[in-house]
Structures are given as structure tokens and as C-alpha cells.
Image (cartoon, coloured by chain):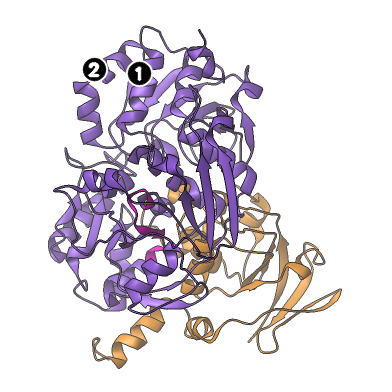
Amino acid sequence: MIISGRVWKYGDDVNTDVIYPGRYTYTLITEQEMGNHALEDLDPIFNREGGKGDIIVAGKNWGCGSAREQAVKCLKARGIGAIIAKGFSRIYYRNCLNEGLPTVVCPEVVDCIVNGEEVSIDFGSSVIRTSKGEFPFTPYPDYVRGLIENGGLLPYVKKMLREQGKLET
Amino acid sequence: MGKTFAEKVLGRAAGKSVSAGDVVTIQPDFCMCHENAASVYKTFQEIGTKKIWDSSRIVIILDHTVPASTEAYANIHRIIRKLAVEQGIEHFYDLNHCGGICHQIMCQEGYAAPGLVIIGTDSHTCTQGAMGAFATGIGRSEMAAVWATGQIWLKVPESMKIILKGSFQPGVCAKDLILKIIGDVKSDGADYMSIEFHGDCIEGMSISERMTLCNMAVEMGAKNAVCRPDERVDISLQGRAKSSNYQKIWADSDAQYAAELFYSLDEIEPAVSKPHRVDNYAKASQLAGTKIDQAFIGTCTNARIEDLRIAADILKGHRVAVRTIVNPASYKVYRQAVEEGIVQTLLDAGCTINHPGCGPCIGVSGGVLGDDEVCISTGNRNFRGRMGSRNSFIYLGSPMTVAYSALCGEIRDPREVFVG
């Protein structure tokens, strides 16, 4: 799998409240509506223009704060292809895997990437290609790779339940 | 080599010996949701499953948008009430005399207990480690998968040992300690870790104080936090424990830690977290003169009877200088506050008493901030836009600091009350 796209670059410790504001959290809005509020309190320009195939590049601890998975879903709904960061907060990272949004932890590359450039993530050979060269990253463990390749936790669970005969095929 | 709390609890749940870094698949003892149960249920149905794997392990507590302030919230509640009936959820806390803030109910009503594994669709689920449980937050889709399969995978975390010595000076409490620790460790300093609070002085702390410590562990990135379960926990669970599976578990003395920290409680000063980061630590005394528009005493961090007592002691016989909102942690706490005369004192001081729940903390009801407004809160997060306008400012402090600041109309060090 290769994901290429234009970069939106952010700093350290970006929290879930500015990725997806709490005021929209407890209404069952559609994924498209979630996308409309993505990064609303962080970056109004992204909120207007960010979209399909783009890649988010962030500092350490991206997604700290709430367990709300809409902070992942809203980016997925916008068509964000992947997030590269120096690090992720635990629940956010878990939500990304479960939602099938590819994440890459690669502290070395983040400072070299500039806002707006095109980068490419090659999950097959585990390298990120940038204007400043190639940077290797540690690939997912097999279990996680299975989740991402199946499109996330829910398709994975459905498949598992079908195999166990607990769901009608 | 000895094992940490996390290694022991997750090993017990997995039925084998495990070490930090291992991945285990286990059945949680309890699965907690609040209003997001409606979303969980929708996803659960999309999976195609009909019946929750074990409805007796599901706990649903309405607390974020209660009583419903909009039609949309009312409809969320309606879906959850229907779900509770359809799935036979006996542990359902609607808006009534039994309910309150989810983590408060989990501890108060005997769900959280030593050695249990509890997952919740709220990041502050780690609060429940105050009762000796391994409790951690997860997302909604993941909860739907657990409802369908009864299983969750968890990585056994590395652990951080925080050793506490001494006792607090007058005017200082557990909230000041945890704000100081977060200020030192920073918001990602305990990422993916299990935090263990050690030291004899934990035994001297109430369950309420332990809940305050464990509650904010997630603000350092921790997976869970825990205090050693002791007789206070036994007493708290007497006649209330909702599971017979519990067992007091604690780390071995020769367990391996990724980090060890020491704090002397005597040296802790009243602390305030400045906007817009929880790790933006300051001493309350350094912020004297910072004008506030609102004071808020509430949330899963500091809205228990002990917290309301502290506030009432400071406010008794005085009038607050700014609008001051109080949300008790539960109806049981509210009732006790009425019986003890605390509510009367708070009303006489000019406070607004809201229903139990946590609406103001996430800016959905009962105390939302407008542009340029400044609030001092007993809550756990001061992120931009959290309590309303993205142009407002949230400071976090202890119930003492918040109550005294409410009287002064500006942030002030509450030790001034205790002088002389």
C-alpha cells in the first residue's frame, strides 16, 4: 500500500477538543457532518480546504484528551489518507487502528517535512519519501496490519463472527 | 522477577503469566458507557449482532447531557432507554435519584473493585483505579465490538511508580499534587503506561482523593492509574460490590518500572493549570490578580461530598464575587450535601446549584463560556473551546482554590484563608 498526498503540518500535543469539538459529540450526526467540523477549532483553513488524499503530519502526542473517536472519524470522512506523527496519544492511536486510518510513528521525518509538500508513505517497504529524502519507519505488528488491511475493527469483527458461525453470511 | 499491578491483573484476566509488551485478549468485568451508548448501539447493530454478549456486564450512565437541553440530546436518551429495555440492561442509570457522573457511580455503587478489568468509552475511566481496578478508556466502535464478541485486546503496559511521602499543608489537597505531577511529567510523559501510586500516605487518603489522583492520569497519557486497595476500599464495597470476581492485587516489591518519581506532600503548594494545556503548571500564588468571570465546582475530578464540604467551609458567611456553578457528582452526593447543610451554605453564598452531571465541563449545558470569558474550574481539562467559546480561557484548580477565587473574583492562593 502506498499513500501519497499533500501535507497539513501541526505541532505537539494537539488535543481531541480542537480536532473535533465536544459540542458536537453527543448527537448522532453522519460521518459527512463529522467531516464538516474537522479541525474546526485548530485550523479554519484546513476546515475549509483540507481533504481527499491529504496527509496530516504532527509532533508528539497527537490526539491527547478525550476517547471520542469522532476525532478520528472526522478526518477519515474528509478523506485524509494517513497521519504521520512523532507520537500519538494511546486512545487516539487505538481509535485510528480500529477505524482503519493508517498511522505512522516516525519522529525523524516530522521536522524535515514542510507544510504543503507532497509526501509518499510506502507501507510495503516501510519508508516515507519526502523532498529531503527517504525515511524508514517501523512497520505494524501483524495483528495491527490485519486490522488495517481489513478496513478496521468492524469489518474484522464481522469476518471473525462469520467464521465462527455467529453471523449470517 | 516481580510483577507490576498491570502485569498481575491482566495476567489473571488472561489466565497466564504476562509481562509488559505482551498483547492479551480478555473478557472485561464491566463495560461502561454514558450518552455514547446510543452510538455504540448503532454500530453494534451494524455489525449484525442481535444480543449483547453479557448484558449483566454492561453499565450505562446518563451524565453528559442531563437533563436534555436540546431535542437532539433528548433523542439520544430515548434511544438509550429503548436499548436498555431491548437488551435487558439492569445496570442502567437514567436521570433519577440513583444516578450521577459515570465514574462516580462506578466507584460509589460498587462496580469498580480490586483486580477487576473495566473498560469505558470515556478517557477518564482511569478514575476507577482508586478502587484498585484496572480501568481504561476506549473508543465507541471498539466498545461495540466488545458488546458483540465479549473480548478486547490489550497491550500489557509498562508501569510508572509514583511514591508519595508526608502530608499536605493546610490549604493543599490531592488536586494540587496531581496538577504538579502533570506539570512535571507533561502531557505525554506517561504515554501508554500504567501509573501506580505508592506510599503509606495513600492509606491516609480518602477514596475521593484517590479518585482525583487517578482521574487525571490520562492527562499525562496514561492507560490506567491505581492506588493500593486497602481497608477503606473494603469498607466502601461492603454490601455494594457488583461482582464477586474481585480480588486485592498489588505490585510485587521487586517489580520493574519504566520510571519512578518521588513527591513529598509537604512541599506541594496550591496549583493552577493555565490555559490551554493541563501541563501548563503555575502556583496559585503566582496568578493572584487574574480576573475571572465564572467559577465551576464539578466534574468527575472534584464534585464529591468532600469537595463540596471544602467549598462550603470557605464560602460560609460570604458572598461570591462572580457567578459560581456547582454540579454535585451524584444524586447521593447532592442529597448528602442537603442533609449536611452544605447546599444551604452554597446558596447563601450566591452559588447556582446544578443537577448532578458533567455538562459544563465539555461545554454542552449548564455553564458554557462566551468570548473572552475566564473560568476557574475544578475539572480536568482546559483545552481551547472545551467549555464553550474557543476564545474563552479555562484555569484548573482545587475546590479550595476555586472557592476562594470565587469569593475574590480573581485567582488567589487559598492558604490565605488558613493563615492565623
- Count of numbered circles on the image: 2
On the question of residue B392 being in view, the answer is no
Residue visible at 51% across and 28% down in the picture:
B376
Residue B132 lies left or right of residue A107; in this view the side is left
Which is nearer the eye, B359 or B265? B265
Q: Mark 2 points at which residue?
A: B341
What amino acid is labelled 1 in the image? Ala
Q: Chain A is which colour? A: orange
Quarter of the image where one finds residue A87: bottom right
Reading the chain from its start, which is encountered first: label 1 or label 2?
1
Q: Chain B is which colour? A: purple
Q: Mark 1 points at which residue?
A: B312
Dot 1: element: helix
Residue A159 lies, with reference to residue A77, above or below; the image says: below
- Figure quadrant of the C terminus of chain A: bottom left
Task: State if disc 2 and disc 1 touch (CB < 8 Å).
Answer: yes
Residue visible at 36% across and 81% down in the picture:
A157
Quarter of the image where one finds residue A51: bottom right
On the question of residue B68 being in view, the answer is yes
Residue visible at 52% across and 11% down in the picture:
B419
